[in-house]
Image (cartoon, rainbow, N blue to C red):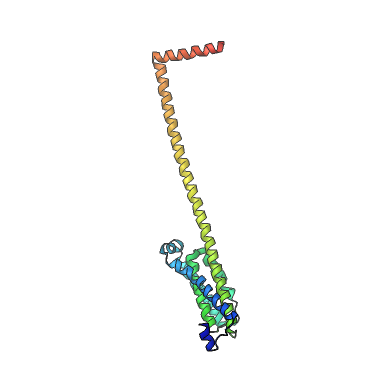
Amino acid sequence: EIYTLSLHDALPISFTTWWVWWTGDAVGVLAVTPLLLVLAQPALLRDQLRSRTVEALILLVATITTIVQPFTTVPGHPLFAVFPLLVWTALRLQISGAAPVACVVTVIVTALAAHQSAPFAGVPVLDRMERLQLFNACVAITSYLLAALTTERRDAQRSLELAGTQLEETVADRTRELVAALGRAQLVQALLTTIFDATPLGFTVVSLFDDAGEDLNLR
């Protein structure tokens, strides 16, 4: 493709051109692959976006508005204006929300760069591609890294809660077993007391114990 573009004088053949082209492919894979993985797991989408569908739609609309409106009306508008929304999406909706929003941002900004819209107006093609790829890489890394950290923290919290619940159940089971054992011991003690107090054998055994105790005291 680079040779084809060079024949039409669209791009010069150089190391910089190859480098920009290859990094563009890598950034594209970085931006799109998590979205494909998320779409392949409907259960993950339901788990992470449960009861937050409205919030996800609001964040998506706000992100698109933040990207499109300023860039088409305000020359030189900073690209980083969208990052607070990306951070919010990653922290609140994890990877199921961060992946679609990050992909939407990269697609829109790529389209703006291709049409030389603000803030890419008047920038040479290689410089424009470098800025675009750096921005898209920052979007993907920020979104996915924060989403992964949030998911890991929530999984750890769930594991701790589960361990606490299991510990409480174990303590309750052991307490019930101890209470039952104590009840059986008290019952046996009551039966033995009744037997020793009510039968001649009991009197004999008690007398033997008393005599043995007296002998020990005399010695």
Residue at left offset 42%, top offset 17%: 197
Quarter of the view holding residue 38: bottom left
What's the residue at 51%, 78% (across, down)?
108
**Quadrant showing the C terminus:** top right
Q: Nearer the viewer, residue 125 or 49?
A: 125
Residue 91 at x, y percent in the picture: 53, 63
Residue 55 seen in the figure: no
Q: Residue at x 46, y 38 (%)?
A: 174
Looking at this view, name the residue that lies furthest to the left. 199
Q: Nearer the viewer, residue 107 or 157?
A: 107
In the figure, 42 relative to 62: above or below?
A: above
Q: Nearer the viewer, residue 28 or 108?
A: 28
Image x and y of residue 65, in percent: 52, 76
In which quadrant of the rendered view does residue 181 lie? top left
**x then y, percent, for residue 155:** 50, 56
Q: Position of residue 127 (x, y in %)?
A: 60, 81
